[in-house]
Amino acid sequence: MADTDFTLTKDYLHQIFEYKDGNLYWKINKGVAKTGDITGCFSPSGYLNTTINRKTYRTHRLIFMWHYGFFPEEIDHEDGNSLNNRIENLRPANRGENCRNRTLTNKNKSGIKGVSWCKDRNKWRVQLQINGKKLNFGDYNDIDYAKFIADAMRYKYHKEFANHG
C-alpha cells in the first residue's frame, strides 16, 4: 500500500499498539523497536512523538484516537503536563480552550495569571483573554484582591478550562 493511500484508523492502531497507563507499546517489531517496547521519542516542544509509516504524530493524539477513533481539532492535557498521556487526562478542545488551560508564563512578573502591575495607575490590573479579545476587569490596590477577581473571571469565562497558573 502506498503511503498516500494510508488512512490511520482506530482498528489499525489496535493492531500495532497496546495502551497501558498513558503509554503505547508496540505489538509488532518495527525497525529497532521490538514487540513490547514503549513508543515515542521526545520532541523539543516537550511532547512525545511516534512515527507510523514515515509520518510523525504526537503520541497523545494517537492515544486519543486509539480510544475514541477520531482526532479532535486539538487535545488538551487537563493537568497541563504534556507527558501525562493517560486517557483520563486528555480531552478534546479547540484552540481557545487549549490556550485557556495554559500555565503561568515565564514573562509574568506578578506571579499571578492575569494580573500585572499598571505603572501609570500604581495598581494591579486584571486582564484576561476571552474569545480572542483582551478584557480589563479593573485595577486594584491589593494584589490578593486582584488575584481573587482574576480567578473568579477565569471560572466564569473559561469554565472547565480555567487554569490559575
Image (tube, rainbow, N blue to C red):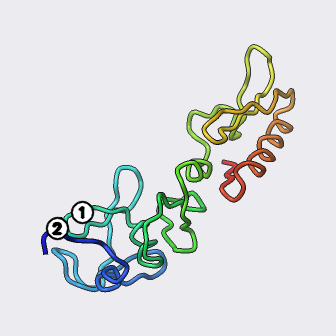
The residue furthest front is 5
Q: How crowded is mark 2: few (under 14 residues within 10 Å), some or many (20 or more)?
A: few
Which residue is under mark 2? 3
The residue furthest left is 2
User: Given contact means CB atoms under 8 Å apart, are the residues at marks 1 and 2 in contact?
Assistant: yes
Q: How crowded is mark 1: few (under 14 residues within 10 Å), some or many (20 or more)?
A: few
Residue drawn at x 78%, y 44% as measured from the top left: 153
Earlier along the polypeptide chain: callout 1 or callout 2? 2
Q: How many marks?
A: 2
Say what secondary structure mark 2 lies in: helix
Q: Is residue 28 left or right of residue 59?
A: left
Whether 31 is drawn above or below 28: the answer is above
Instruction: Check disc 2 and give the amino acid type.
Output: Asp
In the image, which disc is placed on residue 69? Answer: none
The image quarter containing residue 33 is bottom left
The image quarter containing residue 78 is bottom right
Near-viewer residue (151 or 7): 7
Residue drawn at x 61%, y 52% as measured from the top left: 101
Which of discs 1 and 2 lies nearer the camera? The answer is 2
Quadrant where the image shows the N terminus: bottom left
Residue drawn at x 51%, y 73% as measured from the top left: 86
Q: Position of residue 93 (x, y in %)?
A: 55, 59
Q: Position of residue 96 (x, y in %)?
A: 57, 48
Q: Is residue 1 left or right of residue 102?
A: left
Q: Position of residue 156 (x, y in %)?
A: 78, 50
Near-viewer residue (139 or 81): 139
Whether 141 is drawn above or below 41: the answer is above
Which residue is under mark 1? 55
